[in-house]
Image: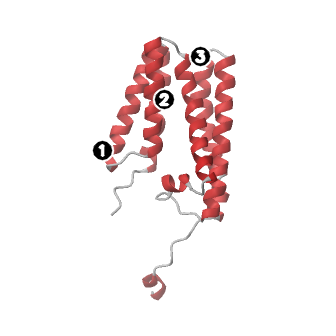
Amino acid sequence: MLGPIMHPILKLVLDIGPLIVFFGSYYALGIMPATGVFMAATLIAAAVSYALTRKVSPLMIFSAVVVMVFGGLTLWLHDETFIKLKPTIYYVTVAGILLGGLAFGRLVIKDVMDLAMHLTDEGWRKFTVRIAVFFLCMAVLNEIVWRNFDTDTWLLLKVWGFIPLSFVFFAAQMPLLMRYEIKPPADETSKAA
């Protein structure tokens, strides 16, 4: 039996909410306190997700672990470099998992997203490659910005650049998703009516 499905708007809020909280608290409190707030907000988002659906997505778990590790290093060593590295590590690792799975004949993204949509294996393969390439580009962009610009610019890119870029990327994938979507068989009772 499948568990409850979370409303897409609520899922979006839980996914990007901690980042928005980090953004706001950075300007109110500075980078170190904002990092602690970001860590707490990430754990709260995961707890709310679990409370509502009795499960937490593997990507949310992985993201929370990366936030805890790199946020913890940021606070412990009092060095903001670690929180700036977090997106790079996250994007490269996820891309590596996706491409590694593909190399071994496993469609990891299908395992994560199959409840949300159903595609042919060819569709999942193409979608996997596109997501992996997009994530690698995002990692490179993060590296360029945090290494060459101040923290304010990096954070502006993270919130007002990465989030819109992600929306644009996933919207651009709709033709691929529609082309390879597996349609549910028509209900026999609806045919008879």
* Colour convention of the picture: secondary structure
Q: Is residue 100 left or right of residue 36?
A: right
Q: Earlier in the sequence, mark 3 or mark 1?
A: 1
Q: Quadrant of residue 142?
A: top right
Disc 2 residue type (three-letter): Ile
> Pointers 2 and 1 in contact (CB under 8 A)?
no
Q: Nearer the viewer, residue 124 or 167?
A: 124
Residue that badge 2 annotates: 20
Q: CA distance from mark 3 to mark 1?
A: 34 Å
Q: Earlier in the sequence, mark 2 or mark 3?
A: 2
Q: Earlier in the sequence, mark 2 or mark 1?
A: 2
Q: Quadrant of residue 95?
A: top right
Element type at marker 3?
helix
For the C terminus, the quadrant is bottom left
Residue that badge 1 annotates: 51
Say few, some or many: other residues with alpha carbon within 10 Å of mark 3 (under 14 / 14 to 19 / 20 or more).
some
Residue that badge 3 annotates: 151
